[in-house]
Image (cartoon, rainbow, N blue to C red):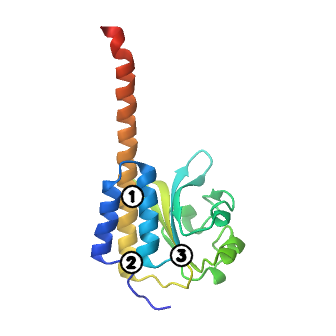
Amino acid sequence: MTQENKISLDLFQLFVQTISSANHLDEMADRLTQLLTGSMGIKGASIFILNPDLEALELVSSAGLSLDYINKGPILVDKSIKIGSNREPVIIPDTATSDLLQYPDKAQQEGVRAIVSYPIVVREKIIGSLRLYHSEQWEVSPNDIRFVEALSQTIGLALLCYRLASAVGNVKDTVNDIHPIWL
């Protein structure tokens, strides 16, 4: 359980490039979760979006995790990773000794031994969560903590851009639908 850096500045730049080069939310999330898993040598990664009506996290993309684990049940904000109701970063270096998990048996069956969960925040509102899963106990280095925090903020900005682009596209479609009436 040593604190070794898994993220370098070059790797972080690759993460940001992956985020900024994607054309769609699903494409960005899929690429990023795969890149996080492969480049960091971890078991898996997931990106969730908050559904405020259900007070649950909804999966956008995941890599490295089984369908059984992904479909284990709803990820309720107040029960999943229980510190601060997902409003604060949570680092669980050893899931076997933690009481913070909503589905501890599923984590054990999946072989998840450590979890890093960072909220995705936009304009001081939680809009989702970035989660990293490791098959070994993991003492996350202070360097990696800062990089994951910056990465979750970058994901938040990207999600805001995708939302704005979608809204502009909807307005454009509406104007194009109405325009022939004006002629």
The residue positioned 42% from the left and 77% from the top of the image is 40
Mark 3: few/some/many CA within 10 Å (<14, 14-19, 20+): many
Name the N-terminal-most of marks 3 and 2: 3
Residue identified by numbered label 3: 43
Q: How many marks?
A: 3
Q: Secondary structure at mark 2?
A: helix
Q: Could you say which is closer to the camera, residue 62 or residue 106?
A: 62
Give the x, y percent position of residue 51. Answer: 56, 48
Label placed on residue 38: none
Image position of 129 with respect to 112: above or below: above
In this view, the residue farthest toward the bottom is: 2
The C terminus lies in which quarter of the figure?
top left
The residue drawn where x is 64% and y is 71% is 101
Q: CA distance from mark 3 to mark 2?
A: 16 Å
Looking at the image, residue 133 lies above or below residue 52: below
Residue contact between numbered discs 3 and 2, judged by CB atoms under 8 Å:
no
Q: CA distance from mark 1 to mark 2?
A: 16 Å
Q: Quick one: label 1 or label 2, which is nearer the N terminus?
A: 2
Residue 66, x across and y down, in percent:
62, 67
Which mark, residue 144? 2
At label 1, which amino acid type do we have?
Ile
Q: Residue 116: x, y in percent?
A: 50, 73
Using a 10 Å C-alpha cutoff, classify the residue at mark 2 as few (fewer than 14 neighbours), some (14 to 19) or many (20 or more): some
**Nearer to me, 74 or 77:** 74
Is label 3 in a helix, a strand or a loop?
loop
Residue that mark 1 sits on = 155
Q: Secondary structure at mark 1?
A: helix
Q: Is residue 76 left or right of residue 27?
A: right
Residue type at mark 2 is: Asp
Q: Nearer the viewer, mark 3 or mark 2?
A: 3
Residue 44 x, y percent position in the rendering = 52, 71
